[in-house]
Image (spheres, rainbow, N blue to C red):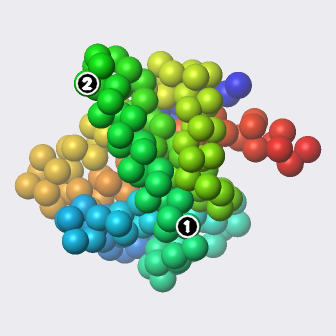
Amino acid sequence: MNKISASDAVQFGIDFVKRHTGFSVVSGLLLAVSCFPLFLPLHPLLIVNFFRCVREESMNGQAPSLGKLFRFDVIVPAIVVAFWGTFLIIFGLCMCVVPGLVLLPVPFLALVTLSFDSQSGLRALTSAIRVVERDPIGLVLACVLLIIVALCGIALLGVGMAITIPIMLVGMYRVAEQVLKPQEQAIVA
């Protein structure tokens, strides 16, 4: 298994945002607006499609486009992952803070898994839980660091979140790529 590098993930996110500033800012604003209750069902879909854009750029060199954020082929699995992933984290936090923290990377990893290939939301969650079992400390530390990066943008009167939310998401993609790469290669072989 590869070692998780949180600093590499943050740097990868910063580099992506520098290369695609317009896309990152607009998608960061869309992700922020999708947190409002009226648009909440779109939030996990936008995250999955954002991860798809990052993957296409990192693997094929395709520039991300805003139109690709609105592909609706995984809306049901994305909503399932968001609902049950949030439930798992809240349940873990209610039981004790530590289980909630350990489960923190699960929804992100499941959404990245959905961006790799369309599957059921529950299958993506169970595969994400298996990945977290392999290196819970590294994943939690990377996830917490990336969330702190996103919170720094929110602390700057909310203006900076248009930049820091994409950095966090691209960083989470990189973390997931670091832990899923050997598994993905085993599936292909």
Say few, some or many: other residues with alpha carbon within 10 Å of mark 1 (under 14 / 14 to 19 / 20 or more).
many
Q: Which residue is more in the foreground, 181 or 102? A: 102
Residue drawn at x 59%, y 38% as measured from the top left: 126
Quick check: 156 above or below 70? above
Question: How many numbered circles are shown?
Answer: 2
Residue 163 spot, x, y in % from top left: 30, 59
Q: Is residue 184 left or right of residue 91?
A: right
Residue linked to disc 2: 94
Residue 89 spot, x, y in % from top left: 35, 34
Q: Is residue 18 visible in the rendered structure shown here?
A: no
Q: Is residue 103 visible in the rendered structure shown here?
A: yes
Q: Which residue is the extreme one toward the left?
A: 157
Q: Tag 2: residue type? A: Cys
Q: Which residue is more in the foreground, 150 or 13? A: 150
Residue 112 spot, x, y in % from top left: 55, 51
Residue 90's label in the rendered image is none
Residue drawn at x 51%, y 21% as measured from the top left: 136
Q: Is residue 120 left or right of residue 11?
A: right
Residue 53 spot, x, y in % from top left: 55, 67
Q: Tag 1: residue type? A: Val
Tag in front: 1 or 2: 2
Residue 74's label in the rendered image is 1
Residue drawn at x 22%, y 44% as measured from the top left: 151
- Residues at circles 1 and 2 in contact by the CB criterion of under 8 Å: no
* Picture quarter with the C terminus: top right
* Picture quarter with the N terminus: top right
Asked which secondary structure carries label 2, the reply is helix
Quick check: 64 above or below 90? below
